[in-house]
Image (cartoon, rainbow, N blue to C red):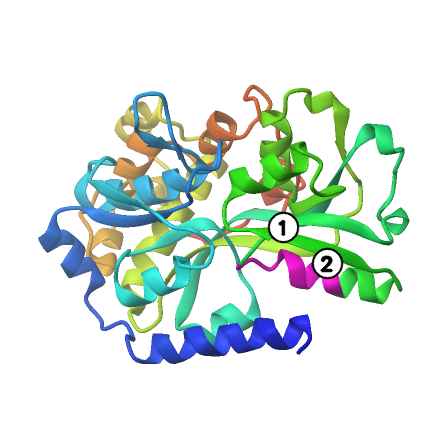
Amino acid sequence: MNLKAKFLMGAATVCTMALGSAATAGTLEDVKERGHLLCGTSEGVAGFSAPNDEGVWVGFDVDACRAVAAAIFGDPNKIEFISLNSKDRFTALQSGEVDLLPRSTTFTLTRDASLGLDFAAINYYDGQGIMVRADLGLTKASELDGVTVCLRTGSTTELNLADYFSANNMSFQSVVFDKSDEIRKAYEAGRCDVMSGDRSQLAVRRSQLPDPSAHIVLDEVISKEPLAVAVRQGDDAWGDVVRWSFNVMVLAEESGITQANVDEVLATTNTPAVKRLLGSEGEFGAYLGLPADWGYQVVKHVGNYGESFERNLGKETAIGLDRGLNALWSDGGVMYVPPAN
């Protein structure tokens, strides 16, 4: 059985499980009654979702959950974080173990149409890349015929590599692992020639190596990887809450609203769109089943999209990513959300 057939068979198996545990409307009510959000996170990926030195979960994906908690409760800390590996993440969402999954998960047709999931918001536009040791002298992906590659199981990475190598008449051998740390350690120990994954993840892993300068990420991007926040299919109202909790962060950045100035903006603005966004005018909260000031609460407690990006992933962090495609559409990127009107 070829790799693509195995990939689709695995998707079909999860789909069958999903049909037996389809979401019923009322997730927002369940969350309110429970008093906190159940957020599915990674097992620890610096910058995206990982416990800090005090054991508090922080990161770019964590902020997606914090935004939802702030919108519902006015408190970004009313969350239980549940660490999930790549293989178990979809089953955990389908079964109700978590309410949402902001876990660096690529939005694909197979996942969208066959796994009982909906992708509420793309929060990071990424692409798959390849990292090699600088001393190998490799400069482009076309030089990789016959290499051994460290990969993560249960991800789109292996299928993308198979497609790329096949299209370029090359071969590779894969060494797969369940956890991100296992991949990095295996690569560091020389068990594979190269490492492949989302370019953002490669930046994280490179920063954790003893000498990051001894490793390079090749320029080629071999796939599109729109990373999105997933919810269970069957509860559109909950999907709206998750989607707009993210959208308000982007809209706030577009409007120049930050954690530091949101109170001043709320008190002084004469702009109708901003008043609606922050809840001093209109009925957006009622439409979503949220308090009137839900948008204000998100910005006040979590910040706008750019603040979350720079705090967790930006140039001043160890990961050191630039905005790239994730810049606002008005700044040459593709980060664009519907208007709040």
**Residue type at the position of mark 2:** Leu
| Image coords of residue 89 (percent x, y) | 40, 57
Task: Name the residue rendered at 58%, 26% in the picture.
Answer: 208
Which portion, as a residue range, is magenta? 154-162
Q: Look at the image and tell me in which quarter the N terminus lies.
A: bottom right
Q: Look at the image and tell me in which quarter the C terminus lies.
A: bottom left
Q: Which residue is nearer to you in this view: 327 or 46? A: 46
Task: Name the residue rendered at 48%, 29% in the picture.
Answer: 312
Task: Name the residue rendered at 41%, 42% in the picture.
Answer: 43
Question: Is residue 336 among the parts visible in the rendering?
Answer: yes
Q: Identify the mark at residue 161; answer none if there is no mark.
A: 2
What residue is disc 1 on?
Answer: 151
Kind of element beneath mark 1? strand
The residue lying furthest to the left in this view is 33
| Image coords of residue 147 (percent x, y) | 81, 49
Left or right: where 43 falls relative to 8 = left
**Residue type at the position of mark 1:** Leu
| Image coords of residue 102 (percent x, y) | 41, 49
Q: Which residue is nearer to you in this view: 261 or 69? A: 69
Q: As displayed, is residue 301 above or below residue 105?
A: above
| Image coords of residue 219 (percent x, y) | 80, 41
